Amino acid sequence: MLNYRITMDETGKKWLETSISGKALLSIPTLNKGTAFTDQERQAFGLLGKLPDCVEDLDTQVARVYQQFLSYDKPINRNRYLNRLLDYNQTLFYELLRRHTSEMLPVIYTPFVGSNVKLYNMRFMQPRGLYISYKNQDKMEKILDNRTNPHIKLIVVTDGEAILGIGDQGVGGMAIPVAKLIVYSLFAGIDPNTTLPIMLDVGTNNEVILKDPLYLGWRHRRIDSASYQVFMDRFIHVVKKKFPGVFLHYEDFGRNNGTHFLKKYRHELCSFNDDIQGTGIVALAAVLAACRKTKTKLHEQRIVIFGGGSAGMGVAENIYSALLAAGIQEKTAKHCFWIVDRFGLVTDRCSEITDAQQPFARNFAEISSWNVENAASISLLEVIQNVKPTILIGTSAQTGAFTQTMITEMANHVAEPTILPLSNPNERAEATPEEIIHWTKGRALIATGSPFADVQYNNQTFVISQCNNYLAFPGLGLGITAIGASFCSDSMLRAASHALAEFANQHCDGLLPTIPQVEAASLHIAIAVAKAGVDEGYATIKIDKPVEEFIAEARWKPGYLPYVYSESQR
């Protein structure tokens, strides 16, 4: 762990104390200021002659690195450059992203992060975070003690089994927690020095990766469920011991493990599954915003979800929870949903059905009168023809799954259909916004999982919102970590959805905020989540001022502190 301390006097002035000096100080991205070290600091920390003579401020440094960024023409090279900058100077990296977010977010996060995962083994140079392999499970405590930063409030953990729509990528999945934590700090102002990405390396079933001579992970097929349960029990126990107040974010676990681990450990550690709950928060917000635009009620919607995995069922559960909270009876609420998975419409006669799908399975008797080709496998088109949905959501990762026939059939019965092709990356989208706009003659309300350009149709510009989880998890994380929440409740998740929808209705042309609006939206969400947590009694940190003020003060912003040499920090 790094030996440094941030001190503040009674006037609020802060400075950093450390004994790290010379080349070592310049090589630590958390502490390095590069050419911004003052003459006095260069003298005190053995940096004289190790830097050019000019002392620069952060503004000048940002201007230089932005020009360097622009010198790369391909996203892959720009991504590589930004990651190198993060490994060189953390403060400079975040300030650059803060000033050029719309331009750089797609490069460092969605949609390019999927390519970064696939290239992980070939491009690997600098490790970030911690890797816990199955063979080292008895050394978990020691591994966690080897972390760089001492005070951890937020962990993003993955096992790399279900990445984005590209599947099992093994240890390459580590690129996702790293990117998620960048977004937490960028949009919500969570101090990156209090975050930790973790890869649980329990093998991979990807035969191509296993045969790759450059593969960096444990060369073994994924462990069986019983062994994984023992491994995960140990991981949760050790994390709880080391960081009892941590917020644990699960990312890209397989559909069964993701649901199981969240339910099993949710009450042991304050936990959140982004694929299930994060997707659900944003999709619910988009649906609420669509209801406002169409002047309809949530319980009046007929919702078809194509893709019954973690993301799709997370969407269903979140909307269902909102319906119950609004006073709708369980039976009525469940009847708003039709889940279509790879074997067709999910009914109580399906032989393959997950625990998450079970509550939403349709009674076969109610669809016995439908005109379908094969009652044992009712297609998406047949569901649309019979249900006449007001809302169609795609979480299938199947390119082009929403055909013109389906969309026009839906639009024939609904004046303003809400269509959400949420699969990532862009090439996995169920339909493109341009196709949907043309097929519905400009009547559809659209939000997509990956970024798409606005659409020009009939001399009109249609704003295409991105229904991406970065609209939800940063604000949720800030609200939770700021109050030290001991539990992430359903009420807190609903508060995030309603806050996001409220912000969108007040400030946005489309269904959801654009990238320049996400920072403000995240603050709005954090305040709502914190208030919900305080009201439910889950806050462990005393709040002695209005929540709005408390949350605003909890946000981290990139900037350099004065440095003071201190032997006590050796």
Image (spheres, rainbow, N blue to C red):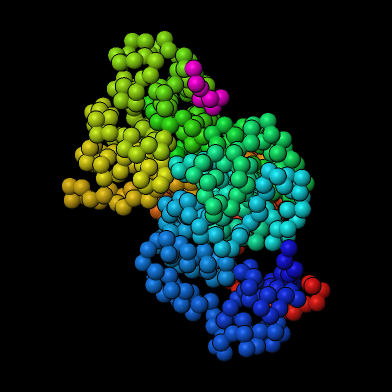
Q: Nearer the viewer, residue 542 or 216?
A: 216
In the rendering, at what x and y percent does residue 231 appear?
70, 39
The residue positioned 49% from the left and 44% from the top of the image is: 208
Give the extent of the magenta segment: 351-357
Residue at image point 61% right, 60% down: 127
Q: Is residue 353 magenta?
A: yes
Q: Residue furthest left?
A: 458
Q: Picture coordinates of residue 47 (x, y %)?
A: 66, 84
Q: Is residue 430 left or right of residue 66?
A: left
- Quadrant assignment for the C terminus: bottom right
Residue 97, magenta (yes or no)? no
> In the image, residue 191 lies at what x, y percent?
62, 60
Q: Is 364 displayed left or right of 356 in the figure?
A: left
Q: Quadrant of the N terminus?
A: bottom right
Answer whether residue 366 is visible to the viewer in this image: yes
396 lies above or below 213: above
Magenta stretch, main secondary structure class: loop
